[in-house]
C-alpha cells in the first residue's frame, strides 16, 4: 500500500472518529455536580440543580439568577437572547441548568447556551407549619393576611394557612391589608421573637381572601372569615353583635381605641371545632354618611368621608370642614402646617363623635386616623360655571379686570366672554399678575354672598 492510500485511510478514520465523538457529545448527559465543585470544572459543560433565591433584571433585558443547592450558591446569567425565550422565573421555584462553567469577578457561574438548557420546576407554596422551621431557606408561602402594622421600616403582618401562621417583614409600605390572600416568596430568618419570613417578591394577591359571613354561619366550613357588627358588652365580656348572632371576644384582641358601640370587623380562623378571633379593628368598609351623624353617636368611633372645603390652621392645630351632602368639622390637634391636605381633597376619617358649640365633630386620635386622596381638577370656562360646580376643583382662564389687596390676602375679578367671577386668594399674587393680564387659575368653586367665587389652594394654582 503506497503512502498516498495510507494518508487517505488515516484521514477518513480521523473524520469518522471526530463524527462519533461529536455525536456522543450530543447525546451524553452533561455531568451533574454540586455548586461547590464548580471551581474544578472551568470551561466544562455541567448540570446543576437548585432553588432560585434571587433575581436581578438588567435594563438591557438580561436576567441574573442566584441558584442555591445544599452545597452553595452561584449565579446563572441569562443574556437577553436566552431570557426572552424562557417562562417567567420566580423566586422559590427550582431550576436545572446546563451550561459552561465560567469565572467572573472571582466567582464561578454556569452560563446556559440556549433556552433548551434551562428547566424550571414551578414548586407549590410550602405549608407555613413547615416553612417556619426552614431557617435560611428561600421559599414560597400562601395565606391570609392579618395583624398588619406600619412603621418606618415598612409593613409587617402575619400570614396564615389552615394550620399555622408566620410573621412577614416587607421593607415596603401599603402593600397589603387585612383579609388579603397573598402568595409571596421570602427567606426564613431567626429573630428575637421567633422565626419570621423576610419578604422577597409578591407573586399573587387577591383582595377577597376572607369571605364575609354572618356570625351564626361560623363553624360550617374551615378557613378564614370576616364578620362585621357592633361592639357591645355581654354577660361575660365584650361581644360583636350582628343580625344573626353574638360572638364573644377575648379582651386582648381589642385595641385600646375601640370602645362599646363602635362598628368593627373581625378576622376569624375556623378549624374543626376551634374558632379563633385573630383581629378586631374598626370597620374600614363601613363609611357613615355625614347626614347620619347624630347626638346618639357622641363618644362612639365612626368612619366618615368627605371633600375638604375649608382649612384653617391655628398654632399647632388644623381645623377642616368636610362636605358630602352636608358639612362636618374635623379638628386635628397637634398637626399644624405639617398635615398635608388641600381644598378639594377627599378625606377619610376614623374618629370619635364629639360636640363643640352645639355642632357635631369627628375627632381623629391622630393623623393616622385619616387618609387623603388628591382632588380631581376639571376644566371649565368662566361662562360655564354654575351652582352644579359648587365645591368642585376647576381650571379656568380669564382676564384680570381688578385687584384688591389686603394684609395677607387678595381678591381678583376675572372676566370671561360674557361674565365675571371673583377669585379670593389667601395669599398675595405675584407681581406679574396685573390688571389686563390673562391668567389661568385652579381653585374650588364656592358661594360668597349668593355669587360664585373661586378659591385657589395656594400660589402654585395661579399661573
Image (cartoon, rainbow, N blue to C red):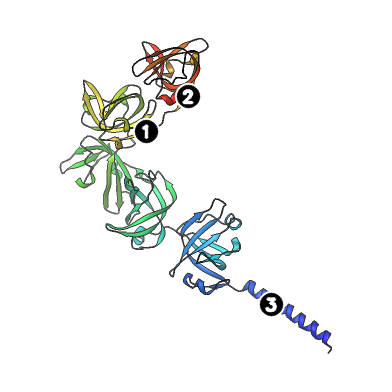
Question: Eyeballing the image, is 431 above or below 130?
Answer: above
In the picture of the structure, the residue carrying the numbered disc 1 is 372
Question: Which of the numbered marks, if any, corresponds to residue 20?
Answer: 3
What residue is at 35 percent from the left and 52 percent from the top? 169
Residue 25 rendering spot, x and y as whole percentages? 63, 74
Query: How many tags in the picture?
Result: 3
Question: Which of the numbered marks, if any, corresponds to residue 378?
Answer: 2
Please give left or right for residue 369 compared with residue 114 in the image. Answer: left
Question: Eyeballing the image, is 219 above or below 298?
Answer: below
For the N terminus, the quadrant is bottom right
Secondary structure of residue under mark 1: strand
Q: Do the residues labelled 3 and 1 touch (CB within 8 Å)?
A: no
Give the mark nearer the N terminus: 2 vs 1. Answer: 1
Residue found at the far bottom of this picture: 1
Q: Which of marks 3 and 2 is in front?
A: 2
What residue is at 33 percent from the left and 49 percent from the top? 157
Give the mark nearer the N terminus: 3 vs 2. Answer: 3
Nearer-the-camera pick, 436 or 143 = 436
What residue is at 51 percent from the left and 9 percent from the top? 418
Residue 385 rendering spot, x and y as whole percentages? 46, 16
Question: Eyeballing the image, is 157 above or below 51?
Answer: above
Q: Residues within 10 Å of mark 2 (few under 14, many from 20)?
A: few
Secondary structure of residue under mark 3: helix
Secondary structure of residue under mark 2: strand
Residue found at the far front of this picture: 431
Q: Quadrant of residue 70?
A: bottom left
Residue 204 rendering spot, x and y as whole percentages? 44, 49
What residue is at 34 percent from the left and 59 percent from the top? 189
Give the mark nearer the N terminus: 3 vs 1. Answer: 3
Amino acid at each position: 500500500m503506497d503512502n498516498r492510500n495510507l494518508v487517505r485511510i488515516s484521514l477518513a478514520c480521523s473524520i469518522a472518529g471526530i463524527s462519533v465523538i461529536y455525536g456522543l457529545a450530543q447525546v451524553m448527559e452533561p455531568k451533574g455536580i454540586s455548586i461547590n465543585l464548580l471551581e474544578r470544572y472551568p470551561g466544562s459543560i455541567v448540570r446543576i440543580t437548585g432553588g432560585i433565591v434571587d433575581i436581578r433584571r438588567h435594563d438591557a433585558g438580561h436576567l441574573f439568577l442566584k441558584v442555591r443547592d445544599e452545597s452553595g450558591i452561584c449565579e446563572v446569567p441569562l443574556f437577553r437572547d436566552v431570557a426572552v425565550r424562557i417562562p417567567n422565573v420566580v423566586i422559590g421555584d427550582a431550576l436545572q441548568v446546563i451550561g459552561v462553567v465560567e469565572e467572573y469577578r472571582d466567582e464561578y457561574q454556569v452560563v446556559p447556551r440556549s433556552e433548551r438548557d434551562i428547566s424550571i420546576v414551578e414548586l407549590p407554596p410550602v405549608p407555613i407549619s413547615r416553612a417556619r422551621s426552614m431557617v435560611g431557606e428561600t421559599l414560597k408561602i400562601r395565606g391570609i393576611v392579618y395583624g398588619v402594622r406600619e412603621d418606618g421600616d415598612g409593613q409587617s403582618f402575619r400570614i396564615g394557612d389552615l394550620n399555622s401562621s408566620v410573621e412577614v417583614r416587607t421593607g415596603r409600605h401599603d402593600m397589603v391589608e387585612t383579609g388579603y390572600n397573598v402568595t409571596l416568596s421570602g427567606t426564613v430568618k431567626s429573630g428575637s421573637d421567633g422565626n419570621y419570613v423576610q419578604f422577597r417578591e409578591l407573586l399573587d394577591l387577591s383582595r377577597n381572601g376572607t369571605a364575609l359571613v354572618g356570625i351564626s354561619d361560623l363553624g360550617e366550613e374551615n378557613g378564614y372569615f370576616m364578620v362585621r357588627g357592633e361592639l357591645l358588652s355581654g354577660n361575660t365580656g365584650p361581644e360583636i353583635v350582628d343580625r344573626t348572632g353574638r360572638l364573644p371576644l377575648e379582651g386582648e384582641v381589642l385595641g385600646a381605641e375601640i370602645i362599646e358601640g363602635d362598628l368593627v370587623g373581625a378576622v376569624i380562623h375556623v378549624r374543626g371545632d376551634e374558632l379563633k378571633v385573630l383581629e378586631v379593628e374598626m370597620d374600614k368598609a363601613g363609611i357613615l354618611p355625614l347626614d347620619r351623624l347624630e347626638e346618639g353617636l357622641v363618644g362612639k368611633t365612626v368612619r366618615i368621608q368627605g371633600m375638604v372645603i375649608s382649612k384653617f390652621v391655628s398654632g399647632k392645630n388644623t381645623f377642616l370642614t368636610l362636605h358630602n351632602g352636608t358639612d362636618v368639622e374635623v379638628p386635628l390637634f397637634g398637626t399644624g402646617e405639617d398635615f398635608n391636605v388641600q381644598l378639594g381633597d377627599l378625606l377619610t376619617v376614623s374618629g370619635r363623635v364629639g360636640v363643640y358649640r352645639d355642632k357635631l365633630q369627628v375627632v381623629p386620635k391622630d393623623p393616622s386616623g385619616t387618609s387623603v386622596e388628591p382632588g380631581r381638577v376639571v376644566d371649565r370656562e368662566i361662562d360655564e360655571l354654575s351652582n352644579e360646580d359648587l365645591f368642585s376643583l376647576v381650571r379656568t382662564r380669564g382676564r384680570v379686570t381688578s385687584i384688591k389687596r389686603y394684609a395677607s390676602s387678595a381678591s381678583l375679578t376675572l372676566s370671561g366672554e360674557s361674565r365675571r367671577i371673583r377669585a379670593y386668594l389667601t395669599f398675595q399674587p405675584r407681581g406679574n399678575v396685573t390688571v389686563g393680564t390673562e391668567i389661568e387659575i385652579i381653585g374650588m368653586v364656592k358661594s360668597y354672598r349668593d355669587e360664585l367665587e373661586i378659591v385657589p389652594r395656594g400660589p402654585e394654582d395661579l399661573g
